[in-house]
């Protein structure tokens, strides 16, 4: 989740009314929601599943650290202490920026396999998580290399890196019972900026280029699975979108973002991935959380289901709530004025319950430590000076743990859910 994208005004999006069923609010905002109440309501939706098999936490690019440990390890340990078994990390060429605090990363790594073999990733992959969701981008590729069509040379580069990474994970962690999910980042945002100010006549080629890129990644993962097997380890590949139609404007039939056709309609049906993920930042503002159910079911209606997971291939790759959005009086949240941490907890509870009703395989919270600075602040658009950590009043409030080490109500809610699994 990047701040510049989250602050854009989202356009109205349409959805067939067929997904309206079972989308009523779960708990109305008539009084302050307690952690025990939220825990009971969420557990009632599990239907025999364990929440620790579903609910995960993201750790990347935090604006502060709380210990002198390498940043990736510090965060992984914090999620482990919370009780989480599903951890989301970034496996990107800019790794040294994303996990820089108190770390000494090697420079000029050539590919994804090399990055996965570094001591920090190795240490985290040995921890007591059973699932790692890895936001993954190939090394040495031009920005948006697919937008003029995927060349054979680029296809080979993509295939080689994804194949070698998958081979490494399947062999290095054989017999551990671990699952690794490799995914892209928010296809609609990528398309929106890659095709900005381009001639619409070029869009069909760009969309086909993304289709071919995603299918090349999937083919590489499948080849490695065929050749090396999945004995006590699994590697899956997911395709993520971030704009999906809602019920609010069902009759409008609008399926565009900044005039660009949606990936859920124009790319998802032409791929063949193991999982399909929604990064949901259309449901983070007060009063919009319940539409998440409809959006997830719409994604499920567009996704192929003939892969190794069958119908169980739906994923909520990101869901979160900025506390600073709840600091002013809001019609939907009158009782929470002046208590933004409780308001964010209420919103996140509703989103998680909506995801469980939609039968997601994974739901990944954004995130452990805040990675965003407030709009209008001193460092907006510039970032903090090198080596300077953010204070709480500089952050937007996408966190489970604040810069002073205190924990928000959502932390207590997640911990109660995980503890109940035991």
Image (cartoon, rainbow, N blue to C red):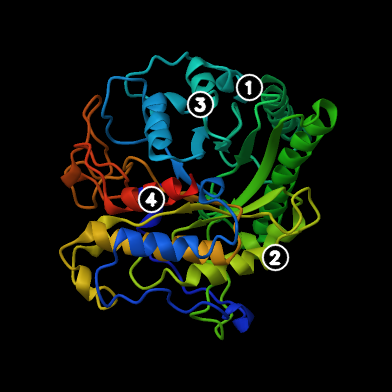
Which marked residue is nearer to the observer: mark 2 or mark 4? 4
Q: Are marks 2 and 4 in contact (CB under 8 Å)?
A: no
Which marked residue is nearer to the observer: mark 1 or mark 3? 3
Going from N to C along the chain, the mark reached first, 2 or 4, is 2
Residue 365 position in % (x across, y down): 44, 49
Cα gap from disc 3 to disc 4, whole angstroms: 21 Å
Q: Is residue 421 visible?
A: yes
Q: Is residue 404 above or below residue 174?
A: below
Q: Which mark is residue 113?
A: 1
Which marked residue is nearer to the observer: mark 3 or mark 2? 3
Residue ranking furthest to the bottom: 251
Q: Is residue 347 above or below residue 135?
A: below
Local SS, label 1: helix
Residue labelled with disc 3: 127
Residue labelled with disc 2: 302
Mark 2 nearby-residue class (10 Å; few <14, some 14–19, many ≥20) = some
Mark 3 nearby-residue class (10 Å; few <14, some 14–19, many ≥20) = few
Q: Residue, x 41% and y 27% (percent of image)? A: 72
């Amino acid at each position: 989740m990047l701040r510049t994208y989250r602050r854009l005004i989202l356009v109205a999006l349409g959805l067939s009314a067929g997904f309206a069923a079972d989308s009523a609010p779960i708990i109305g905002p008539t009084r302050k929601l307690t952690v025990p109440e939220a825990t009971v309501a969420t557990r009632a939706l599990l239907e025999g599943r364990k929440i620790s098999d579903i609910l995960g936490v993201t750790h990347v690019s935090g604006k502060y650290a709380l210990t002198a440990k390498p940043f990736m390890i510090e965060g992984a340990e914090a999620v482990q202490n919370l009780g989480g078994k599903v951890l989301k990390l970034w496996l990107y060429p800019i790794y040294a920026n994303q996990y820089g605090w108190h770390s000494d990363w090697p420079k000029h790594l050539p590919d994804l396999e090399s990055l996965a073999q570094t001591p920090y990733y190795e240490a985290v992959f040995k921890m007591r998580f059973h699932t790692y969701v890895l936001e993954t981008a190939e090394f040495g590729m031009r920005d948006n290399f697919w937008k003029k069509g995927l060349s054979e040379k680029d296809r080979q580069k993509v295939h080689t890196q994804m194949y070698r990474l998958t081979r490494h994970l399947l062999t290095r962690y054989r017999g551990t019972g671990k699952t690794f999910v490799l995914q892209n980042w928010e296809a609609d945002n990528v398309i929106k900026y890659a095709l900005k100010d381009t001639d619409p006549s070029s869009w069909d080629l760009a969309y086909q280029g993304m289709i071919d890129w995603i299918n090349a990644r999937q083919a590489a993962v499948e080849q490695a699975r065929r050749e090396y097997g999945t004995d006590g380890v699994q590697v899956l590949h997911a395709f993520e979108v971030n704009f999906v139609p809602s019920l609010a404007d069902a009759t409008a039939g609008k399926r565009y973002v900044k005039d660009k056709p949606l990936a859920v309609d124009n790319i998802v049906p032409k791929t063949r991935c193991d999982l399909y993920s929604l990064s949901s930042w259309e449901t983070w503002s007060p009063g919009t959380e319940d539409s998440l159910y409809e959006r997830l079911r719409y994604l499920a209606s567009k996704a192929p289901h003939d892969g190794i997971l069958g119908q169980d291939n739906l994923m909520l790759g990101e869901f979160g709530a900025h506390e600073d959005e709840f600091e002013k009086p809001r019609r939907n949240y009158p009782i929470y004025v002046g208590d933004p941490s409780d308001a964010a907890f209420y919103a996140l509870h509703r989103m998680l319950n909506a995801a469980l009703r939609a039968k997601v395989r994974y739901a990944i919270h954004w995130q452990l430590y805040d990675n965003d600075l407030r709009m209008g602040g001193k460092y907006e658009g510039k970032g903090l000076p090198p080596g300077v950590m953010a204070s709480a009043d500089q952050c937007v409030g996408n966190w489970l743990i604040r810069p002073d080490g205190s924990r928000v109500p959502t932390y207590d809610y997640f911990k109660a859910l995980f503890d109940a699994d035991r």
